Image (cartoon, rainbow, N blue to C red):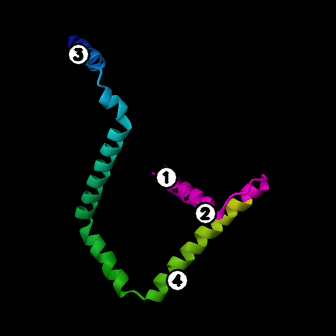
Amino acid sequence: MAGNSRILKSASALRSYIREMNLPSIRENSKLIAQFILTALFFGLGIWFLKHERAELAEVKATLVSSQWTWVLLGIGVTVLYIILQGLMYVGAFLSIHCQVKLKDTVELFQLAMSSDEFAHF
């Protein structure tokens, strides 16, 4: 128990020291610093992904090169049509409550909903 109280006292001392230091540049630029840290993190994750998934990426490339482009383009077209139809569904939903929105905005809303929904399943 004595070790825990020393840790708590040292953490408290560290917090008060940081407050006393009054680092205005860190406080004023905290959003910029956080963005830099997140950018560095995602660059690191991207590099890690490319390093560890190189074989799978090469396999995907080989599959795409050897596939029939008509089917690939048809698949991309069906996907674009699906996204536009979902956007139109959102337009209709907003019209039902007498709000007029642009298709472009509803497509962005659908993409946002899909990306947050994918993370919810994990």
Decide: marks 2, 1 in contact (CB < 8 A)? no
Quadrant in which residue 66 is drawn: bottom left
What mark, if any, has residue 104 been given in the picture?
2
Whole-Å distance between the Cαs marked 2 and 3? Answer: 54 Å
Label 2 or label 1, whichever comes before in sequence order: 2
Decide: marks 4, 2 in contact (CB < 8 A)? no
* Residue drawn at point x = 31 percent, y = 31 percent: 26
Residue stretch rendered in magenta on the structure: 93-122
Query: At label 4, which amino acid type do we have?
Result: Leu
Whole-Å distance between the Cαs marked 1 and 4? Answer: 28 Å
Query: At label 3, which amino acid type do we have?
Result: Ser
Secondary structure state at the residue bearing disc 1: loop
Whole-Å distance between the Cαs marked 4 and 2? Answer: 22 Å
* Badge nearest the viewer, 2 or 3: 2
Left or right position of 14 against 88: left
Left or right position of 44 against 117: left
Query: At label 1, which amino acid type do we have?
Result: His
**Residue 104 is covered by the magenta coloring:** yes
Where does residue 94 sit, x and y in percent of width and height? 72, 55
State the residue position of label 3.
10
State the residue position of label 4.
74
